[in-house]
Image (tube, rainbow, N blue to C red):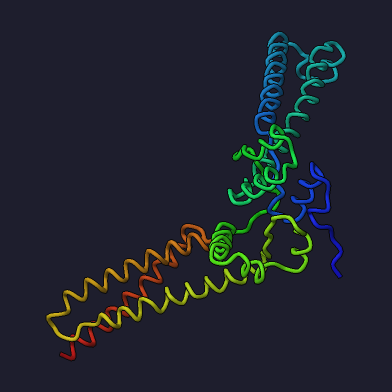
Amino acid sequence: LIHTHAVDQYVVGYPKVAAYENSDPNFLIYRKFGWLHNRILLCLQDELADLEYRLEKADKRTLADEKLRSRRLDYADSPLRKSLIKQITERLEIYDEHLLRFQKIQAIRRPTIRNQRSLFNFVRNTDSLVHGEYQWIKEGVDLAALAHDGTHGWFIGFIADTFNRISKKATLAIFRTKEQRIITGHENVALLSSDRLDILLRIVLTILAAILLLGPVMILFELQPTHRHDVRRNSWYQILTVLVFTLVFSASCSIFTKARRHQVFTATAAYCAVLVVFLGNTTNVLTSGK
């Protein structure tokens, strides 16, 4: 059973915007307020720097004093240092909390241009917010996407946009679930199932892998020289084929996988070696037979 509310059932305004953001995780976009965080951290940092200077100054005044060798004597006879350390502890705790929190916030990725544009267009087209209260969606680098769009989010978006241009009706019929149809209601909102798009992406990547593996083999086979005077000319074509497919393979590994640089280099070297071995074997067999 599916029990949910359509976006168009909510009152125009913040309720409708909240319902739209809740309709798809990719629309959970908010500001980081990076400038405000930096402003607070800079103020706390300077306060701590001032307290640090005052503590060092107090230490230098009692450099040869026995009290510096005993916290108990120092705190009993000199309340100044005790007060400074207490203030430093309090401010340092607040500073560390803000610093670590801001580090986590900055680690949140910004939304894709596609998702950012979708949220902006919805708010503007439905007139849900006044002009001055939705301009924050344009902030760009200061935005945080609470839901990660996935490793191939941009490619999935490209595929979805391509299918929409071909036939929007067919795209919605294939890639939209029943629950998404209920959520969108009568609004001009086209939600697509990420699971179904992921299946399509896997099919595309499978076809691409097959082309990268079998494509150069077929081309190299067709470019085999049939006469001795064709060996030099065809060899250049074969080397160019190996070069092009190796570059495409390396780019595909970098774009469509999470492989690190050394892993991409190793995989590319192995792929190129296989093609070179195949090229050498076919050329040697034919040239030796003529």
* 73 left or right of 285 in image: right
* The N terminus lies in quadrant: bottom right
Quarter holding residue 197? bottom right
Q: Position of residue 170 (x, y in %)?
A: 62, 70
Q: In the depicted view, which residue is nearer to us: 36 or 154?
A: 154
What residue is rendered at 32% in x and 78% in y? 219
Q: Is residue 148 above or below residue 287?
A: above
What residue is rendered at 70% in x and 53% in y? 147
Q: Position of residue 242 (x, y in %)?
A: 32, 71
Q: In the depicted view, which residue is nearer to us: 109 or 82?
A: 109
* 6 left or right of 195 in image: right
* The C terminus lies in quadrant: bottom left
Residue at the extreme top: 61
Q: In the depicted view, which residue is nearer to us: 219 or 92?
A: 219
Q: In the depicted view, which residue is nearer to us: 241 or 63?
A: 241
Total label count?
Answer: 0
Quarter holding residue 65? top right
Q: Position of residue 15 (x, y in %)?
A: 82, 45
Q: Is residue 201 above or below residue 131?
A: below
